[in-house]
Image (cartoon, grey):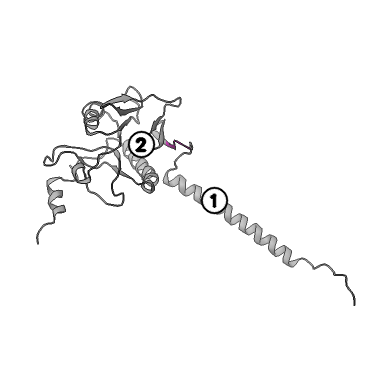
Amino acid sequence: MRASTSDILDDIYPDSDGKPMAETQVHVALLASLYGLLEYWLKPRGIYLAGNMFLYYKEGDPKARRTPDLMAVKGVNVEHKRRSFKTWVEKAVPCWVLELTSKKTAKEDRGPKKRLYRRLGVREYFMFDPLNDYLPRQLMGFRLSGGSYQRMEREEDGGLTSKEMGLRFVPDGNDLLVFEAKTGKQLLHYRELQGELERHRRATDKRIAELEAELARVKSAPRGKHNGRR
C-alpha cells in the first residue's frame, strides 16, 4: 500500500520526541487546566489553540521546531485535529504564545524562544512562572512593535491584557486566572462551570416546583358563589 502524503510528512516531521511535556506536577496540572479553559472560549471565536505541540517553522528542516506550552493561531481550521503545526502548510503563525517557565526552561524561554517568536512574527509572547522562582516577574508579556518585542506594563493586580485574545491573565499563587477583557467576567474551569450549571439547574427545578404547587393550590381552592337570577 502506498503511503499517503500525510504519513510521509509525519515520518519526516515527527509529533513527539519522547520527553515529558512539563517539568513538575504543578506545570502539568496548570497546562491541562488552561488548555481546557481557553479552548472552550476560543474555539467558538475561530481561534485555534494547541498545547505542547511541535511548531515546525522551516520547510525541509525537521530540526527547526519548538514546542510552545500553549499557542493560539488565527485564520486556520479550528476543527482539524493536527499532530503537529507546520507554518508553511497552514500559511499562518501563532498570534499568541504562553510558556510555563520552569528551572529547565527559563534560559531558553527568555532567550532563544523569545528571539525565534519575534522573528516568526508572533505578536504576543507571555511567560508565566507558576513557582515564581525563575523569572524577574511571575507573569511577563511582550508585544511585537516595529519588528521588536516591547515589554507589556503590568496592571495593578499584576495581570496582563492580551489584545490578540481579548483576555486578561492574572497570577494567583500557582494558578493563572483568565478574564474577558471587555466584561471583566472570569472564565471558569470545567469543574467550576459544571458547578455553575448544577446550581442553575437546582434553582430552576426549585422555581418550577414552587409554580406547580401554586397552580395546584389555585385549582383546589373552593370556587366563589356567583350571584345571579334563578
For residue 48, the mark is none
Farthest-out residue, left: 2
| Disc 1: which residue | 200
- Does the stretch in magenta take in 217? no
For image coordinates 72% across by 67% down, the residue present is: 219
The kind of residue tagged 1 is His
Q: Is residue 158 left or right of residue 200?
A: left
| Disc 2: which residue | 164
What x and y, as percent, mark residue 52? 26, 41
Occupied quadrant, residue 117: top left
Residue 144: tell me if it is visible: yes
Element at label 1: helix
The kind of residue tagged 2 is Glu
Distance (Cα) linking label 2 and label 1: 32 Å
Element at label 2: loop
For image coordinates 50% across by 47% down, the residue present is: 196
**Numbered range of the magenta stretch:** 178-182
Q: How many marks?
A: 2
For image coordinates 45% across by 24% down, the residue present is: 156
Q: Is residue 59 left or right of residue 197?
A: left
For image coordinates 30% across by 27% down, the residue present is: 145
What x and y, as percent, mark residue 139? 36, 28
Farthest-out residue, bottom: 230
Q: Quadrant of the C terminus?
A: bottom right
Farthest-out residue, top: 136
Q: Quadrant of the N terminus?
A: bottom left
Residue 104: tell me if it is visible: no
What x and y, as percent, mark residue 23? 27, 35
Which numbered disc, 2 or 1, marks the residue closer to the eye? Answer: 2
Count residues near mark 2 (Cα–Cα under 10 Å), then give few for <14, some for 14-19, many for 20+: some
What x and y, as percent, mark residue 35? 34, 43
